[in-house]
Image (cartoon, grey):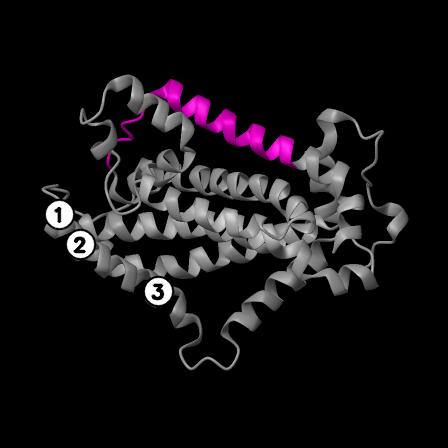
Amino acid sequence: MGVSENKVLRRDGKLPFLSAPVKIMQNLYNYRQLLKHFIGRDLKVRYHNSILGYGWSVLEPLALTVTFYILFAILSDSEDPYRPLTILLGILAWSLFAKTFSNGTTCIQRNSSLIQRVYFPREIFLFSKSGYNMLHFILSLFVIIPLLIHYGLMPTQQILLLPIALIMILMLGTGLALFTSILQTKARDVEHIVTIGLRISFYLSPVFYPLEMITGGRIPEQYAEAYLIANPMATYITMIRSAFTGAPLDIPTMNLVITFATTIAIFWMGSIYFMRKERKAVKFI
């Protein structure tokens, strides 16, 4: 891990307001070997003594896709020609966000014994969860290859939306977890609140249905715009679908700008909050 404590860019009351995310990124770079170690550890633990191993990365989203495809086919009159693919992409995108947020919320509390034995920047735990979930997402993407071949879909310029959406999803999930990981050390109820909130948000987000069901005239336009602003994942899920299907991204530019700005602000404020409160928070674990 090779970096002495006195080289760590520490958080304290004198920390400049605007520099917190930069300090975190520098700490992550200094401790990059430790970050890789934690990501690899999580991958090994997840699939240890598992017969199917990494196969579980695709089986879980596939099972959910089949379930929601059948349910959606019965209840909806949507004529989406790529319905199985769009449902699967929605599930994968949502899982990346939800697991990054929920795992990050509890990572400080659940690593309390290690925190008490040795010093290193605590944000390593949160970002290792983000990295692990990103790798899990990439492994899961292999399951969409047969569907892309079946529908004859080839990469278009829309594929450039994919890395943007993934970065934004990770920033959103990690940014929220920077707040809740600190709060979780003081009140163990936080993880349950996060779980309930994610469950509600799952159904309020276009995971197994298209965004057009919200913005396509079924509700007043002003409410549809408010929905897009209040729910960044609606935009990011739609971006990932457009990246693979080649469909145009039918979201107003201003809504995209507001969504990106909101996500960046959440990550920025979360970084500041974490760095200012982390030292006191570890006393509660």
> Is 255 displayed left or right of 264 in the figure?
left
Callout 3 secondary element: helix
Tell me which numbered mark, 3 or 2, is placed earlier along the sequence.
3
Callout 1 secondary element: helix
The reply to whether the magenta stretch includes residue 258 is yes
- Indicate the quadrant where residue 227 lies: top left
Name the mark nearer the viewer: 1 or 3. 1
| Vertical position of residue 156 compared to residue 283: above or below | above
Name the mark nearer the viewer: 3 or 2. 2
- Indicate the quadrant where residue 244 lies: top left
User: Can residue 1 be seen by looking at this rendering?
Assistant: no
Q: Quadrant of the N terminus?
A: bottom right
Amino acid at circle 3: Glu
Q: Which residues are the magenta region?
A: 247-270
Q: Residue 75 got which mark?
A: 1
| Vertical position of residue 234 compared to residue 114: above or below | above
Residue at 26% in and 57% down: 65
Callout 2 secondary element: helix
Q: Can you give x and y, in whole percent of width and height, for residue 120 in the image?
A: 79, 54
Q: Can you give x and y, in whole percent of width and height, for residue 205 in the image?
A: 33, 40
The reply to whether the magenta stretch includes residue 200 is no
Q: Can you give x and y, in whole percent of width and height, for residue 89 in the image?
A: 31, 50
Residue at 31% in and 26% down: 251
Q: Quadrant of the C terminus?
A: bottom right
Residue at 63% in and 31% down: 268
The residue indicated by pointer 3 is: 60
Residue at 50% in and 40% down: 167
The residue indicated by pointer 2 is: 71
